[in-house]
Amino acid sequence: RLAARLDAAVSDLACDVAVVGGSLAGSAAAGALARGGASVVVLEKATFPRPKICGSFLSAEADPVLERLGALDEIRLAKAETITRFALVRSDGRRPEADLPAPVLSMSRARLDSLAAAAAERRGARLRSGVTVLSFEGDLRAGFRVKTSGEEIVVRVLLGAWGRYSPLDGRLARPFFRREPSLFGFGKQL
């Protein structure tokens, strides 16, 4: 029944690809797909810029990826700081310090996400902010019906780039969904 409903809706296709999540991974994927000729919409629940700690530390390995995304020059023009050394401040006040193996770039995640999303839009992707994906159904053969906070859209391909702790992970019964996070983020001391 789903395949028949999706086939009947082919003329109503919103686009070739819907990317759920517009942060770095989603914007990078959307930009690459749009540059390759696909019609792409990015469904992002937040409105950029938005504060977030993780991801403001860009290792040297990120440079070629940011270059392909079309955002590296903008990040440098936006006065990303170059960091060559780090310190960890322990609870007893001691500060082990060391040089980093290679210089890294740092800027607020709010600014970084905005630049990445703008780069994807320049390549032809459409960013829809403030849109929460509630559910989806379908498959790669027949396409997908995506229910959002405001509408339903039909797409050929659905790409999940929503991060790790979305309610969508719970609906997909992903094994890590209920586990405590084991990751931490670095931030610049102000």
Image: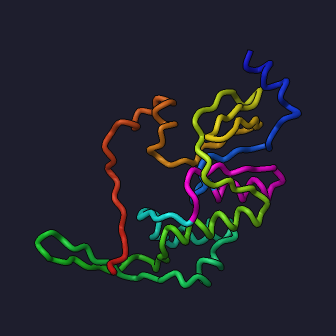
Toward the viewer: 183 or 145? Answer: 145
Q: To which quarter of the image does residue 88 belong?
A: bottom left
Judge from the rendering whether residue 35 lies leftward or rightward of residue 42; answer left or right: right
On the image, the x and y values in percent for residue 54 come to: 43, 62
Up the image or down, 136 lies above or below 75; here it is: above
Residue 40 colored in magenta in the image: yes
Residue 103 colored in magenta in the image: no
On the image, the x and y values in percent for residue 55 come to: 47, 64
Query: Can you name the residue that lies furthest to the left here?
Result: 92
Q: To which quarter of the image does residue 185 belong?
A: bottom left
Judge from the rendering whether residue 137 lies leftward or rightward of residue 34; answer left or right: left
Judge from the rendering whether residue 60 lies leftward or rightward of residue 157; answer left or right: left
Q: To which quarter of the image does residue 148 belong?
A: top right
Question: Which quarter of the rendered picture does the N terminus lie within?
Answer: top right
Up the image or down, 101 lies above or below 179; here it is: below
On the image, the x and y values in percent for residue 19 come to: 66, 47
Toward the viewer: 91 or 168? Answer: 168
Name the residue located 11 percent from the left edge and 72 percent from the top edge. Answer: 92
Up the image or down, 27 lies above or below 142; here it is: below
Query: Can you name the residue that lies furthest to the right here?
Result: 11
Name the residue located 48 percent from the left edge and 42 percent from the top edge. Answer: 166
Up the image or down, 68 lies above or below 100; here it is: above
Q: Which residues are magenta?
A: 27-48
Question: Which quarter of the rendered picture does the C terminus lie within?
Answer: bottom left
Name the residue located 73 percent from the left edge and 50 percent from the top edge. Answer: 41
Name the residue located 69 percent from the left edge and 28 percent from the top edge. Answer: 139
